[in-house]
Amino acid sequence: MAYVVGSDKDFDKTRLAKAVHRSAVANSMPTGQAENFARYVVERVEKWIQDKAEITASELRLQTVATMAEYDSDVAYLYENENKIF
Amino acid sequence: MPADFMNIWLPLIVAALVQASFALGVSMLTLLSSHILASKKPERLGRLSFFYIEGIFMAVFIGLAALVFFLVQLPYSQGAHFWAIISGAATGIGLMVLLFYYSFGKKNGTRLWIPRASAEFLYKRTRAVSQPFEAFILGVASVIIELVFIIAPLVIAANLIVNLAGTMQILAIFIYVVIAILPTFLLYLSNLRRNKISNFQLWREKNKKFLQVTAGFLLMILGIYLFTYKAIGG
Amino acid sequence: MKKSKFDYDVIVIGSGAAGITSAEIIAKSGKSVAIIEQNRLGGSAPYISDIPTQALTTAAHSLDSARQAAEFGLRTQTVGYSYPLIEKWKNLATRRSGAKFTSDYFNKNGVAVFRGRAHFISKNEISIGRRHLTAEKFVIATGAKPLIPNIAGLNEVDYLTMETAMNLLKPPKSLFVIGAGETGCQLAEMFAIFGTKVYLADAKSRILPREDEQVSELFEEVFLKARGMEVFSSSRVIGIRKHGAMSIVTYLQNGVERFIGVDKVLLATGYAPNTDLGLGNAGVEFDGNGIKVNEFLQTSVKNIWAAGDVLGRFGNVQGAVYEGEIVVANIFGRNKIVPDYRAMSHVIWLSPEVASVGASEIELTRANIKFKTSVVQNSAIERAKTSNFAVGFTKIMTDKDGRILGAIVVAPHAAEIIGELALAIQYGMTAQQIASTIMPFGSWSEVVRLACAQV
């Protein structure tokens, strides 16, 4: 499992899934759809990570946003900018 | 009446519009709403948002009323010197808004002037809201935090309202507060209808320069207007 | 002596043509250098692309020549081949070419070797596995990988890429090649010679879309008439599905949907640069076409340089080697060099070979440069008659003063002939100078002299 430099722990797909799900639901996506969305995103991100031993927290975030944007750019925007609201 | 309109109501409305164009209240409601919608009880959105707006409303209303009360006691509040100080402060703060209100850089979303450590704290506090009174306090806090910018339009508004008769003062304060919190209220209504938060946030990000320039210039123009009308003309 | 704060002066990521060139030159200059390689040392050229392709196409063209040798009075009825032996020959050629690239070889030449996947953590630090290395400067030479197109159903079939096509145990009975660029055409022709029924498709309006139009027209005719291939230009593959042991390929040609059942599908849709190495962490700008560099091959980060296929420019070894040299000169030299690609030749290993150098007609037209053209068919020279091979031509483009701007040679041994034209372009020679040079009578070079004389 890839180690995330910056957060000092291994990649945690459950945590990522929760964060993605959260952003989707916060953007008024129905819960079931949000769950599928989160699962899809995490699968794609896991695939991207599989041949990497280490990644940084910021590139994990970028990759997650890029993957989300392929499916729903609005949710991707919210995920990317949640900590830039103020 | 027309004299009253030019002397009091017009600058009062402009001051309210200036306060309305400041972003912290809207930003915090955006974050609060996204947090509630993503929580296990999204149905609390309406109630908690309402109490948040109520907090802003009460803070601005009471703050403005208190200022009016204080300025009524002050013998020289309508004097040319006092107006000169207020208009100078407004112009200066308008310039500050133009320069510092939003963080520079395209990738900074709608990040504001708040120091990062304080912003982090606010972020955590907003996400931790789960009770109506917490939402209310958060609303009050958003007004207090942004006091450094909104003090100018508030003092201007208060000093204008001092010239009105008793009941008209209450009406004027109410009108000011309604205009000042209108964007936040519209966001609240939009969230109730479950419109996408991202749409509103994206709009804000795309137009932040416009909002910043509008707020800054309006404040500066208001300052110059009052200086001309009240400090020199008065 | 002051201890450096970095592990190495330079780290080179990738041990292909560009990476090896850079690393060796840097080591010779006395600097500390390390090379990082995820796969086999030596990169793709010795093992996947140039060498195995050339070994197999040599075998194919030899077979083709042998079949036609009846015209010379040879008895060719029993000419055949053994594909396992051809594979064995290819593996031998590959081993010969890549054999020297071992860790020992690099160590002896002063280059430290690290095996693994490099990933930037910051602009001066990479991780390989969990190990971190730092360097003052980096050279990214990670090359490119086959681009897998987004075609519905592709994942259901066992498709071939250039690498896997090189390692088949026998040629397929039928083959659908998606992509009629250089790689697609080379492999398509090779398999056609070995007896495969080949269907060659490209979304563009002609095959070999990057080459001169005359080259495309010539080879479309050659493929159809001499190789028994079917060529579908302006055809986009929209779906593939499995049907027993076959693959049904559905494609759109002129708005009409058609389908064909084949044994195997070969993807030759181009290459994607290998940019998935945490470039964002280092601040290096890149896009789908490759890493963005300035005219000195320096990336958006001052201490990081890039060379070779990862730039998405040429996709050939000579270009990668050249860029590897330029990068080192620019890293350590005071006066930076801008690479000059005018005289870099490009070869496609078909029969006849296609070799080009300099600017193409399209490039000259787009740049609004007035030029003169001369085209001479190979049939005009004696060699074509004595070798019974008249297919091909030579085209020379010159400016108004006769200086050679570009050239295309389509002929046997074109790769050898093009060298003189590359030299001419490099040193600003005129077509008249070439025309007045004595060429051996009966050689293929005569077509060059004739073409230069007629400009």
Image (cartoon, helix red, strand yellow):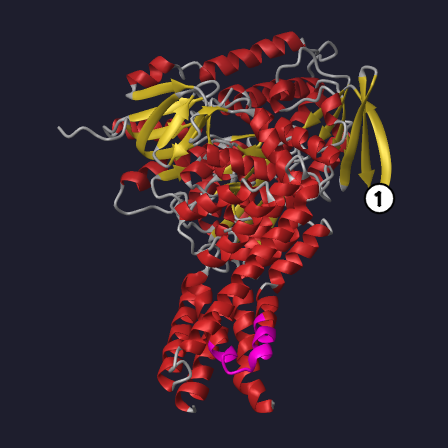
Q: For the N terminus of chain C, which image quadrant? A: top left
Residue closer to the observer: C382 or C433? C433
Q: Give percent across and percent down for residue A60.
A: 52, 33
Q: Is residue C454 visible?
A: no
User: Which amino acid, by three-letter code, is at mark 1?
Assistant: Gly
* Quarter assignment of residue B80: bottom left
Prevalent SS, magenta region: helix
Looking at the image, which residue sits at the far left?
C1
Residue B171: in magenta span:
yes
User: Tag 1: Cα neighbours inside 10 Å, few (<14), some, or many (≥20)?
Assistant: few
Classify residue B136 as left or right of residue C249.
left
SS under mark 1: loop
Q: Residue at x 44, y 29 (%)?
A: A7
The answer to whether residue B57 shows anywhere in this view is: yes
Q: Write the start and end of the magenta stretch as one range.
A: B159-173
Location of residue C229 in the rendering, given as x and y in whole percent from the top left corner: 77, 28
Asked whether A7 or C170 is in front, the reply is A7
Q: Nearer the viewer, residue B33 or A24?
A: B33
Q: Position of residue C231 (x, y in %)?
A: 77, 34
Quarter of image, res B224: bottom left
Reply yes or no: does residue B163 show up in magenta: yes
The chain letter for the residue carrying disc 1 is C
Q: Which residue is mark 1?
A: C255
Q: Nearer the viewer, residue C82 or C179?
A: C179
With respect to residue C57, does C352 lie above or below? below
Q: Residue at x 83, y 44 (%)?
A: C254
Residue C443's image quarter? top right
